[in-house]
């Protein structure tokens, strides 16, 4: 059930009222008993995030971002080292990459 803000135009009294959506709008002021009460436009039923978990899980800290970037760089370096190692073993056998592929295709066709 929502909370509504009310204000009396007669005496200026302002208050919040917790009532059902299906209940009619109140017209009588509880202070001065005049029929000059009106419901104010509030912020509505906005989403309110409470607690520290929302911020920490959705918006990463700078240290987390730096750690992820360093990890990515180390993974990229490891891939480059692996490729360089493969190239050096290819060159030591004396065959180029295209020669190896064509010989592999020939053996598959047999």
Image (cartoon, rainbow, N blue to C red):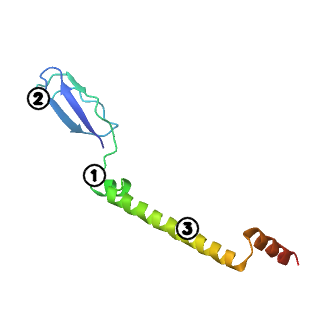
Residue nearest the observer in this picture, 34 or 71: 71
Q: Residue at x 33, y 40 (%)?
A: 45
Could you say which quadrant of the image residue 24 lies in? top left
User: Which residue is labeled 3 in the image?
Assistant: 80
User: Which residue is labeled 1 in the image?
Assistant: 50
Query: Residue 31: image x %, image y %?
Result: 11, 29
In the shown orientation, is residue 81 left or right of residue 19? right
**Is label 1 in contact with label 2 (beta carbons under 8 Å)?**
no
Distance from Cα at disc 3 to Cα at disc 1 = 45 Å
Residue nearest the observer in this picture, 92 or 97: 92
Query: Residue 74: image x %, image y %?
Result: 46, 67
Q: Which mark is residue 64?
A: none
Q: Secondary structure at mark 2?
A: loop
Q: Earlier in the sequence, mark 2 or mark 3?
A: 2
Could you say which quadrant of the image residue 13 lies in? top left
Local packing at callout 1 (Cα closer than 10 Å; few below 14, some 14-19, many 20+) is few
Q: Residue at x 68, y 78 (%)?
A: 92
Residue nearest the observer in this picture, 77 or 94: 94
The quadrant of the rendering that contains the N terminus is top left
**Is label 2 in contact with label 3 (beta carbons under 8 Å)?**
no
User: Which residue is labeled 2 in the image?
Assistant: 31
In the shown orientation, is residue 68 left or right of residue 96? left
In the rendered view, tell whether residue 62 sits above or below residue 86.
above
């Amino acid at each position: 059930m929502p909370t509504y803000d009310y204000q009396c135009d007669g005496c200026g009294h302002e208050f919040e009222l917790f009532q059902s959506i299906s209940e009619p709008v109140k017209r009588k002021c509880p202070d001065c008993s005049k029929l000059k009460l009106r419901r104010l436009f509030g912020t509505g039923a906005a989403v309110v995030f409470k607690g520290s978990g929302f911020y920490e899980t959705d918006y990463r800290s700078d240290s987390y971002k730096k750690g992820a970037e360093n990890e990515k760089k180390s993974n990229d370096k490891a891939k480059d080292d692996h490729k360089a190692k493969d190239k050096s073993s290819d060159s030591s056998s004396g065959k180029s990459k295209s020669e190896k592929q064509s010989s592999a295709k020939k053996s598959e066709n047999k």
